[in-house]
Image (spheres, grey):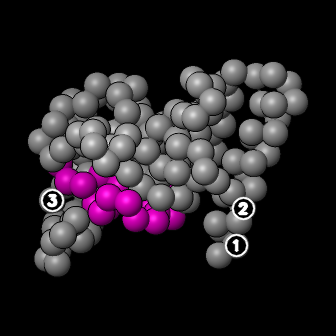
Amino acid sequence: MAEKKSGLTLIEQICDIMDERDLSEVELTEGQVSVRVRRANADVIPMVAMATTIPGQQTVGVGDATESTEQGELIRSPMPGMFYRAASPDEPSFVEVGDSVSKDNTICLIEAMKIFNEVQSEFDCDIIEILVENATAVEFDQPLFRIKRN
């Protein structure tokens, strides 16, 4: 629970600094986590999620109770919040398994503190597996997608 609070506190501090100094973009990198907050409009703030190489890690896929030992990299959540695969229930998902994604393409939304944050791919890749159900809560650093870089 303390990790959630510190993640939300960090986001609040970044937003406060952006407001105080009238900044349009802030980028923060610590270890393997990189967060970029950019004002595109009042309702959407893009976030870039880093991928971590985890060869042979076992995970449970969306709607699948079996374990997968498929190789690849993981794109992890840059913040705690609610995970959404589409901009609204009436719109198609940003990505599907098998899709090729270009750098800076939106792959999902994470709602945190009533703000919808775009999670964008940091590089060109193929979506191998979607690891989270739509409209569910995710933790900071939780694996969202298994991908293969192009």
For disc 3, the marked residue is 70
Q: Of the two numbered discs 3 and 2 on the same chain, state the one appearing first in sequence.
A: 2
Magenta-tinted stretch: 128-145
Residue that sits furthest to the right in the current view: 20
Q: Of the two numbered discs 1 and 3 on the same chain, state the one appearing first in sequence.
A: 1
Residue 120 horizontal/vertical position (percent): 42, 34
CA distance for labels 1 and 2: 6 Å
For disc 2, the marked residue is 6
Instruction: Mark 3: give few (<14), some (14-19) or many (20+) Cα within 10 Å.
Output: some
Q: Which residue type does callout 2 highlight?
A: Ser
For disc 1, the marked residue is 2
Residue under the image location 75 percent in, 56 percent down = 9
From what the image shows, is residue 46 above or below residue 86? above
**Does the residue at mark 1 contact the one at mark 2 (Cβ under 8 Å)?**
yes
Residue 13 horizontal/vertical position (percent): 79, 45
Q: Which residue type does callout 3 highlight?
A: Glu
Where, by quadrant of the figure, is residue 66 drawn?
A: bottom left
Q: Secondary structure at mark 3?
A: loop
Q: Secondary structure at mark 2?
A: helix
Quarter of the picture holding the C terminus: top left
Is residue 111 shown to the viewer in this render?
Answer: yes
In-image side of 49 versus 88 (left or right): right
